[in-house]
């Protein structure tokens, strides 16, 4: 009987480095939302990759950054806590020799971690001077001890198979923790909320900052297979509400159209999506709102 390997792997890195894109590429389907805006991931997102060799359970974490509000503090704690619960850490960085404050913060965390670590150079396809790659790698390996260094382009799905091979080399032998068909522990409602938030981030661009959350008010399937979904986009300012709705409702309709396509792919059926907007002033600084919207530590 073939020996299987299984274990838990944390994806860490500063905001907007491509952690969610990489996890989606490895798993082979969309689990975590992505956008060009930093701090898109707010909670720890679990995804499972399974093949004949065994099972990799990924924990995609919020980007490690300097917290500016209670939501930021929660995100930072989630990211750091994840490092204590895994067998292996993947540190994702961009191909630049500049090590900023975000990377320095991660270096200090990883230097004190006894977990095995793999350095993953992402966005390798964007390098203008590939000859500098060895110098870039040396910058990181001189500060933290890594088992290996792997180069990938998560967006173009390059180097993904090599990275899987590398991960399995350092996982312990053990049983599968989840059924082979399991890809995430997120509920359909949670994923639906995230897909709507992703579309809002994408459509609104820089007009509304990260002060939005999405609540699923109702999600049920009719006897004919059609899904009825009612969701509320929460923002922090009356001015933001006007921007989200748009002139004549154009923006919220645009968000809804993009989200409905994604949700239909998720549920494999037709979706009737209704979106609403409400203002909760400074909700990112309000513990009660943070708890209501799902941003809280487990007891």
Image (spheres, rainbow, N blue to C red):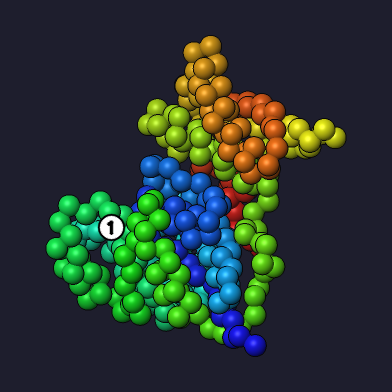
Q: Position of residue 270 (x, y in %)?
A: 70, 33
Quarter residue 159 falls in: bottom left
Judged from this view, the residue extending furthest toward the top is 248
Drawn side of residue 297 relative to residue 37, left or right: right
Vertical placement of residue 225 versus 238, above or below: below
Placement of the C terminus among the 4 image quadrants: bottom right
Pointer 1: what residue? Answer: 124
Crowding around mark 1 (Cα neighbors within 10 Å: few <14, some 14 to 19, many 20+) is many
The residue drawn where x is 64% and y is 44% is 266
Judged from this view, the residue extending furthest toward the bottom is 1
Foreground of the two, 31 or 16: 31
Quarter residue 137 falls in: bottom left
The residue drawn where x is 41% and y is 63% is 160
Drawn side of residue 60 relative to residue 36, left or right: right
Q: Position of residue 92 (x, y in %)?
A: 36, 62
Vertical placement of residue 146 versus 234, above or below: below
The residue drawn where x is 43% and y is 42% is 35
The residue drawn where x is 48% and y is 25% is 240
Element type at marker 1? helix
Foreground of the two, 227 or 280: 227
Placement of the N terminus among the 4 image quadrants: bottom right
Judged from this view, the residue extending furthest toward the right is 223
Vertical placement of residue 120 versus 207, above or below: below
Foreground of the two, 282 or 272: 272
Can you see residue 201? Answer: yes
Q: Position of residue 71 (x, y in %)?
A: 50, 48
Q: Position of residue 34 (x, y in %)?
A: 46, 46
Can you see residue 229? Answer: no
Vertical placement of residue 72 versus 220, above or below: below
Give the tally of numbered discs: 1
């Amino acid at each position: 009987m073939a020996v299987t390997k299984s274990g838990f792997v944390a994806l860490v890195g500063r905001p907007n480095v491509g952690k969610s894109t990489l996890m989606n590429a490895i798993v082979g389907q969309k689990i975590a939302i992505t956008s060009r805006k930093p701090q898109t991931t707010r909670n720890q997102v679990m995804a499972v990759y399974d093949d004949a060799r065994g099972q990799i359970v990924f924990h995609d974490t919020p980007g490690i950054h300097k917290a500016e509000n209670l939501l930021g503090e929660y995100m930072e704690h989630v990211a750091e806590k994840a490092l204590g619960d895994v067998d292996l850490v993947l540190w994702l960085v961009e191909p630049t020799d500049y090590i900023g404050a975000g990377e320095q913060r991660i270096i200090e965390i990883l230097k004190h971690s006894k977990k095995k670590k793999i350095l993953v150079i992402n966005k390798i396809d964007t390098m203008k001077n590939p000859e500098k790659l060895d110098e870039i790698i040396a910058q990181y390996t001189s500060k933290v001890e890594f088992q290996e260094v792997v180069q990938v382009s998560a967006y173009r799905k390059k180097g993904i198979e090599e990275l899987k091979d590398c991960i399995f080399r350092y996982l312990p032998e053990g049983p599968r923790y989840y059924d082979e068909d399991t890809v995430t522990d997120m509920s359909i409602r949670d994923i639906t909320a995230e897909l709507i938030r992703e579309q809002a981030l994408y459509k609104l661009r820089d007009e509304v900052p990260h002060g939005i959350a999405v609540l699923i008010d109702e999600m049920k399937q009719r006897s004919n297979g059609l899904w009825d979904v009612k969701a509320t986009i929460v923002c922090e300012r009356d001015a933001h509400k006007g921007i989200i709705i748009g002139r004549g409702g154009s923006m919220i309709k645009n968000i809804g159209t993009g989200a409905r396509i994604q949700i239909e792919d998720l549920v494999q059926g037709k979706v009737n999506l209704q979106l609403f907007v409400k203002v909760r002033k400074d909700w990112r600084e309000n513990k009660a709102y943070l708890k209501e919207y799902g941003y809280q530590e487990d007891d």
